[in-house]
Amino acid sequence: QLRLVESGGGLVQPGGSLKLSCAAPRFTLDSYTIGWFRQAPGKEREGVSCISSSGTTNYVDSVKGRFTISRDNAKNTVYLQMTSLKPEDTAVYYCTRVGRSALGTCMLSDPSPYWGQGTQVTVSS
């Protein structure tokens, strides 16, 4: 079981930025495909972005051009840089391992069943 720890959330005004971190205290992340997900109050959890071990990425349409996923293998961390934040981005954000396609790309449709505590992102004036 790959245990991941999310951090970096907070309260930000619309149009602001935040950078989330996803760390693995006891595993080396570089060979894993990792995804970010979010769950807003009263809504189902949705996939936001994912990154493969080779660095290819996918994004849900609502965040394309605003969010950037990256990984720093030296720091054993995956990041989600969020810019131009909107109130509808308010949610608890989670990271988890995701599946890979036959071509090696990451699949937001195939998350691991293991979830951490998440980190709260609130976009409000």
Image (tube, rainbow, N blue to C red):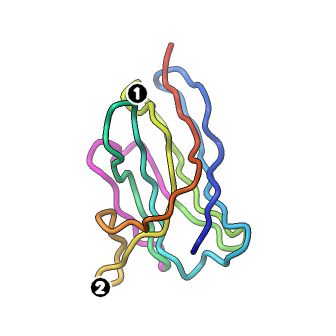
Identify the mark at residue 86; answer none if there is no mark: 1
Q: Going 31% across and 43% down the picture, which residue do you hit?
A: 44
Q: Magenta span has 4?
A: no
Residue 58 among those drawn in magenta: yes
Query: Disc 2 versus disc 1: distance between alpha carbons?
Result: 33 Å
Q: Quadrant of the N terminus?
A: bottom right
For disc 1, the neighbor class at 10 Å (few under 14, some 14 to 19, many from 20) is some
Q: Position of residue 3 (x, y in %)?
A: 62, 66
Residue drawn at x 42%, y 45% is 38
Residue 47: x and y in percent read 35, 53
The kind of secondary structure element at disc 2 is: loop
Magenta residues?
A: 54-69
Residue at point 28% right, 86% down? 102
- Farthest residue in the top direction? 125
The image quadrant of residue 100 is bottom left
- 108 lies left or right of 13: left
Residue that numbered label 2 is attached to = 103
Q: Label 1: state its secondary structure.
A: loop
